[in-house]
Image: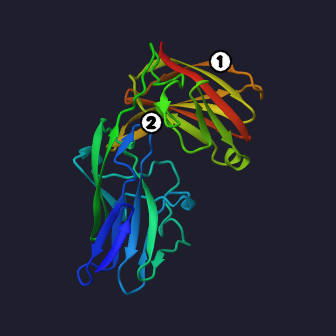
Amino acid sequence: MKIFQAGNIIFLIFSGFLWGMQLVLESPKMIYQEEETIFLNLTILNDSSEIETHVIEFLQPRENNLMYIGNLHKLKIEGIPEMTNFTNHMPPEPKPHSPQTNKNYKPIVLNPGETYKIRIPFFYDYYPVKLPATFNVNFCWLNKTSNAVTFTVLPTKGTRRGDNLIINGDFSQGEDGTPYGWKVLDDRTRWDSSQKFLMYSVDRKTAETEGYWASSIFHEISSPGEYILSVRTKTSGPTIIIFVEGWGIVGGRRRRIERNECFYHQPINQTWEKQVRKVKFTNPEVKWMRLKLYVYGSPGDVWFSDISMIKK
């Protein structure tokens, strides 16, 4: 008998009954808020006396060590029919790194007793799931299935003010360093609850390559429709674009099907500027809207405050 521990889970593996690749799935938390991005942790254990290989399809960029779900690997999600064929790849993002997409692909090689750890982005919000929702999830590969993990996602605690469609548009609400109603990527984003702004600090490499962004959670809207978008911004270098995205159901999952691009050209200084744009959706299949606060071009700091979107 072997004892294998992953996080708070202890597995007893009996020789002669279980062998080869063992799969251990973990959820870092039992309760998540709508603003949080969920990453499940997978451990692959070689419990055989032979060298084993495992082909893993990675989400790009490969260096982030995130697993692509939807081809060789599956997630079995109980009780959520909208997520029967779950994938965490969102076109037009780069195709997953796999033997089919890269001639230099090399599989993971594990000696006896070795483990490999990888994260699985659980993008439930790509699907029309109503919150609160409880997910019971297994990881599946060929004829092997991991243990089940169970966790619950709660709707945001943030609120709207007046006719503003955006939850917590003034960045006054939140907890534990995260503003309600907004998804942030990492610690390059800072939320100031006292001065009520969201600020990015962007280095040159990021600014000159993929850029940087935070986004709102999804908001239900009616389309066709016209809206007035208002925001206060300031920048020490980066160029600002706010993408006002319209999302609908395509092939059983949420997909972006329309987009307004609002460019904000302003002097590079420490002065706040209020800017107003008209935006509209014409596709009647648009059911949800999301704001993506995007910056690129030059390194520096960018501030956002007092965001509103009001139907005309």
Q: Amino acid at mark 2?
A: Ile
Question: In this orientation, does residue 142 appear?
Answer: no
Which of 224 and 35 lies nearest the eye of the viewer? Answer: 35
The numbered dot on residue 257 is 2
The residue furthest bottom is 49
Q: Residues within 10 Å of mark 1 (few under 14, many from 20)?
A: some
Is residue 219 placed above or below 66 in the rendered structure?
Answer: above
Q: Secondary structure at mark 2?
A: strand
Mark 2 or 1: in front is 1
Does 4 sit left or right of 63 as displayed? Answer: left
Q: Quadrant of residue 128?
A: top left
Image quadrant containing the N terminus: bottom left
Q: Amino acid at mark 1?
A: Lys
Is residue 155 placed above or below 273 in the rendered structure?
Answer: below
The numbered dot on residue 23 is none
Q: Which tag, 2 or 1, sits closer to the chain's start? A: 2
Where residue 184 sits: x, y (%)? 53, 40
Question: In this orientation, does residue 8 appear?
Answer: yes
Number of numbered callouts drawn: 2
Q: Secondary structure at mark 1?
A: strand
Which of 136 and 8 lies nearest the eye of the viewer? Answer: 8
Does 305 sit left or right of 136 as displayed? Answer: right
**Residue plotted at (28% across, 76% down):** 13
Which of 200 and 5 lies nearest the eye of the viewer? Answer: 5
Does 192 sit left or right of 246 as displayed? Answer: right
Where residue 100 sits: x, y (%)? 47, 67
The residues bearing labels 2 and 1 have C-alpha atoms spaced at a distance of 28 Å
Where residue 282 sits: x, y (%)? 45, 24
**Residue plotted at (64% across, 19% down):** 275
Which residue position is annotated with label 1? 274
**Residue plotted at (71% across, 40% down):** 297
Q: Quadrant of residue 289?
A: top left
